[in-house]
Image: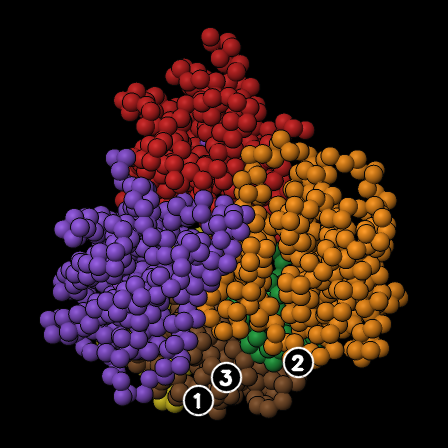
Chain colours: A red, B orange, C purple, D green, E yellow, F brown
Amino acid sequence: MGSVDPVVLFFVLGVAAGLLRSDVRLPSALYESLSIVLLIAIGLKGGVELAKTALGEIALPALAVVLMGLGTPLVAYPVLTRLGRFRRPDAASIAAHYGSVSVVTFAVGAAHLTRLGVPFEGYMTVFLVLLEMPALVAGVLLAKGIHRATDWRALAHEILCGKSIFLLAGGLAIGWLLGPEGIRPIDRLYFDLFKGILTLFLLEMGLITAARLQDLKRAGAFLIAFGIAMPLVSAVGGAVTGWWLGLSVGGTTLLATLYASASYIAAPAAMRIAVPEANPALSIGASLGVTFPFNIVLGIPIYHAMAKAVHGLGG
Amino acid sequence: MGSVDPVVLFFVLGVAAGLLRSDVRLPSALYESLSIVLLIAIGLKGGVELAKTALGEIALPALAVVLMGLGTPLVAYPVLTRLGRFRRPDAASIAAHYGSVSVVTFAVGAAHLTRLGVPFEGYMTVFLVLLEMPALVAGVLLAKGIHRATDWRALAHEILCGKSIFLLAGGLAIGWLLGPEGIRPIDRLYFDLFKGILTLFLLEMGLITAARLQDLKRAGAFLIAFGIAMPLVSAVGGAVTGWWLGLSVGGTTLLATLYASASYIAAPAAMRIAVPEANPALSIGASLGVTFPFNIVLGIPIYHAMAKAVHGLGG
Amino acid sequence: MGSVDPVVLFFVLGVAAGLLRSDVRLPSALYESLSIVLLIAIGLKGGVELAKTALGEIALPALAVVLMGLGTPLVAYPVLTRLGRFRRPDAASIAAHYGSVSVVTFAVGAAHLTRLGVPFEGYMTVFLVLLEMPALVAGVLLAKGIHRATDWRALAHEILCGKSIFLLAGGLAIGWLLGPEGIRPIDRLYFDLFKGILTLFLLEMGLITAARLQDLKRAGAFLIAFGIAMPLVSAVGGAVTGWWLGLSVGGTTLLATLYASASYIAAPAAMRIAVPEANPALSIGASLGVTFPFNIVLGIPIYHAMAKAVHGLGG
Amino acid sequence: MEAHSGTLLTIICEAGLEPVLVADLVRLGARGYTICDTRGMGSRGMRDALWEGSSNIRVEVLGDRALIETLVAHVHDRYYANYGMVLFVTEVEVLRPEKFLKRPGEDPS
Amino acid sequence: MEAHSGTLLTIICEAGLEPVLVADLVRLGARGYTICDTRGMGSRGMRDALWEGSSNIRVEVLGDRALIETLVAHVHDRYYANYGMVLFVTEVEVLRPEKFLKRPGEDPS
Amino acid sequence: MEAHSGTLLTIICEAGLEPVLVADLVRLGARGYTICDTRGMGSRGMRDALWEGSSNIRVEVLGDRALIETLVAHVHDRYYANYGMVLFVTEVEVLRPEKFLKRPGEDPS
Ligand SMILES: Nc1ncnc2c1ncn2[C@@H]1O[C@H](COP(=O)(O)O)[C@@H](O)[C@H]1O
Ligand SMILES: Nc1ncnc2c1ncn2[C@@H]1O[C@H](COP(=O)(O)O)[C@@H](O)[C@H]1O
Ligand SMILES: Nc1ncnc2c1ncn2[C@@H]1O[C@H](COP(=O)(O)O)[C@@H](O)[C@H]1O
Ligand code: NA
Ligand code: NA
Ligand code: NA
């Protein structure tokens, strides 16, 4: 059993607590505090690594990663409207959630690779930041078309200044400015405690996931199937893109994980304001109730295997 | 003064803040967060140790510990009804509080031994988990008799899925599954910070204790005497049981501490629902206002002395 | 860029988040928890150092530090009433804020010196505790005169038992009692994490500062100028006093920083009760909106230069 | 404003009651409720919310007069004697009474 | 007690609405508001406040009848259909009605 | 439902006032009170609850008309001019008026 990640066990404990209606409950202030620390820590770590890379070197790959990443919402939307018979705003909102990314899934993926000793490109965090946003814009366009009156300035503000991008990008900048030496006095909090904080966070995510399972019953079998199939398809896209860009096996795994992950922080907030007609129980039920647990428990090892396979075939 | 435990000094600081009506106040979210981390940490530590022990080896001792532990409520109840002239539900509820255990008192006891370099059996945490529950059942039986309509399923759920047992047992299981190697990435949070977190927690416990001292005035001299005498009596039982089971001096000290400690998390919650006629000001006033401070400041060293004495006499 | 303090970068990030109306928001429970940990940690650190000093040795210097410290409110008050044309209670309240000290500014100053490897007297924390209070008394006297009915007992209680002095002094006492050895088990939380916790705290202070900038517009140019000039003047007093008392360059820097800093925890609370006619938007606008950011970003290096200059001239 | 009359029940009680109380309210027909965490003082002394054992909650239920009277009667009989609790009822105006009245069918009106 | 009649609007809704809702209230003339964090249940299911996506807020605005009717009409048209929301209006007595009514001039009356 | 008329006072004010305000209320005869933490905006600007200096509380006191009028008069004279504060009074129905009225004797009725 030495090969199970502690983080996964805490997630399972949280789900069990929720399903058994235990009164275990993390105060919401703790949840918010942990997510702030995680976002900053991931940003810092990425920034320190980024300092080792020439920015020009990753500009083109970053563009490719973003463009390929738009594949997910563009595939998801017609599947949801035609096969799933969802209303237009609902389909667009779900597509936006799946096109965007989950920071915690990324963190668990990185922890998984670290535990196995698989190296990955430090600048993956930059892709994480860049991937959060475009799918949200795509979602609004899918919902309303380009002609309809959308308050694009408000949406841009909502996304760019949203907690999640702001803290990731802020951490990235600070890590980049300080470099490995400058960061040392604060690494006890942000790096040494990272894994432990992640376990608490996943305990809470387990509780939240369990509470979402009710929504799922309403949502029905199609959405559950979508919540498992969509990430697998997106991960294939990520694995191929990663290999094509010359990423390492670790980096390819993380790109597949990013593509496969569905947002549940930035996307719900942005969609709620920009596409209010969409029912959030559907998009959050799928992303938190199905895709998040699937990725944490089964997905990440699968994406790792995919990355190895693609590299094996390709190289 | 090098021999005072930091934890005790923080407790005294908290009591002083409360009595002087200082506006020092830990946010309740911090209190809840710290208790979650403490419960998980104690569970994890126990689980890692447990991995070194054959489960069969401790099954019988565990049974003995639980059965002997029922001595406390069975002694407390007649004392409280006859000598203390308490109403039946009040006596039963207080008996349940004293029969169950205090996780924090256990943690302070373990920290005390660690500071003195006294080793103890790692699986003591298992006894901690097992001892929380049976006295609560005994309390309900004492209050209502076996024939009266009690919602036993609800009570079982309340106890087994209560935060305290759930997180201890969950931590125990995860620690046991991961073992010392697997736990390493998260030991910075749960083990290295443990003692520091305990100081914050005891600062808060001091504030809470100070606030309870008012209740005590209402409760009267008998309950104060009971709150000191009962743990001493129970500790003797614990010391003898520990020696009889062949525990080390450290393990014997912790068993005496467990028997002597009174619950203030699981018991109040369970009794409030199962025996609503009992006045919680009495049971909590005694357990938090008298017994908890007594154990933290004076009791634990006394129980250690007891354990040494019993081992001296016995062996 | 290796020479920027991480703490300053986090403060700037917080200000940016506030000005851009990002939804980054630390839960108030986190803010309160961090300030409790910081106060205790600063106290503990000072107490451990204090254990190395004979108390008699610092009694007279402490008296001189306190008396010279009263210079700030006595200069500020006539400047504010005559030049600034403030009402008497407003001038007195602002004078009290500037006469008292900011714990976080002190912590950032100490971190700055530590990063540069400049040593300072460990007992500076004692001065920090002692300087918090007298200016508040001076402020009430300035507002009401000595004859008017003031509830001095209530004020004394408000100040002495206020969170800030109570936890600093409590930490100081515990650190002094335990000494460097006794403190070891808890130094992972209070010392190792200190700098990281400070970054989170300054992120929040940035958010708070940004929110105060509105108040400043109402307050006008005079108060902004005062908020920059006053600390510079006070710092000169501190630098000279430090040199005169024979403090090291580091100690002199910290004394100048203390004199230059303006309170925003103890003073607002005390003035609100004792001088309710004073408008808190003015005093807090100046101390949090101008002086705090000035000190953090520019002031501390300036005071360090002052201290070196005075020591250069003097010795 | 097309307003209709509605009735608001506010219950202030020990936080530990939340799960059972809420289950009762829903079982007796409440279509929704809103809870916030509070502290306070009353005949049973200080409830300072320092820890879970001394916290209060404030529960609000909107409904029609009949529903609220049912809830008040039940809460009074079942909890009032043994638990720290206060309750009061206010007449208010609401927008879409169907939201609080219709029992069956979960359409978000 | 020199009391005057006032009107209190209470809105319970998804926490994510806070910035836009509050901006609307102020734009339409509210001189102030008070917000507390809550959790609850309603026609859109459980809102357990475990995370930001499932938290509610409770907004109170004191004003005169005319202001409150304006606010209710706007909130109803703009948000009621698409967001989890409940609102009710109570007649209350207030001390200094100028505080809630006068639009221009910021004197703290 | 055997309801009686009661009066509810709600005070929204700066959090720093809590200890003195509560002491005054009890001294003047309040048998209990309930407090929750809030944020808000008013004539004295934004109170965003980011830190202790910008937090508000919401205090509720149930009593009879006479008690509430005493409390309102005192709070108005003592605090209204100098502190950020709003208050309003609502007529409500309560269950056991003795609980809020009887002064001496601490029996939990
Ligand atoms: N007169 C009152 N006004 C407002 N709240 C009250 C009052 N009496 C009691 N409460 C609240 O109800 C809780 C339980 O009251 P009790 O059962 O009287 O101890 C208290 O902790 C207060 O939060
Ligand atoms: N009948 C009700 N009484 C009190 N609060 C309610 C009621 N119905 C809904 N709410 C609150 O309003 C929120 C949104 O309601 P809804 O749009 O019906 O889901 C819920 O989460 C509750 O906090
Ligand atoms: N019109 C209003 N409606 C609701 N709450 C208000 C109103 N005006 C003020 N408040 C609350 O009372 C606090 C103090 O108000 P003020 O003294 O006007 O600054 C504000 O921070 C708000 O929480
Ligand atoms: Na994705
Ligand atoms: Na016990
Ligand atoms: Na100063």
Foreground of the two, D60 or A15: A15
Q: Residue furthest right?
A: B147
Question: Residue type at mark 2?
Answer: Arg
* Quadrant of res E109: bottom left
- The chain letter under disc 3 is F
Q: How far apart are marks 2 and 3 (CA)?
A: 20 Å
Foreground of the two, C11 or A285: C11
| Position of residue A288 measured from the top left corner of the image (x, y, whole percent) | 54, 40
Which residue matches tag 2? B218
Between circles 1 and 3, the one closer to the viewer is 3
Q: Does the residue labelled 2 lie within 8 Å of ligand 1?
A: no
Identify the residue shown where x is 68% and y is 29%. Answer: A1
Q: Locate residue B80 relative to residue E21 in the image: left or right.
A: right
Circle 2 packing at 10 Å, graded few (<14), some (14-19), many (20+), is: few
| Position of residue A18 measured from the top left corner of the image (x, y, whole percent) | 63, 48
Q: Secondary structure beneath disc 1?
A: helix
* Quadrant of res F82: bottom left
Identify the residue shown where x is 55% and y is 60%. Answer: B9
Q: Secondary structure beneath disc 2?
A: helix
| Of the image marks 1 and 3, the number of the one nearer the N terminus | 3
Residue B165 position (above or below residue B210): above
Foreground of the two, A26 or C64: C64
Between circles 1 and 2, the one closer to the viewer is 2
Identify the residue shown where x is 74% and y is 43%. Answer: B121
- The chain letter under disc 1 is F
Question: Residue type at mark 3?
Answer: Val
Which residue matches tag 3? F26
Which residue matches tag 1? F69
Q: How far apart are marks 1 and 3 (CA)?
A: 14 Å
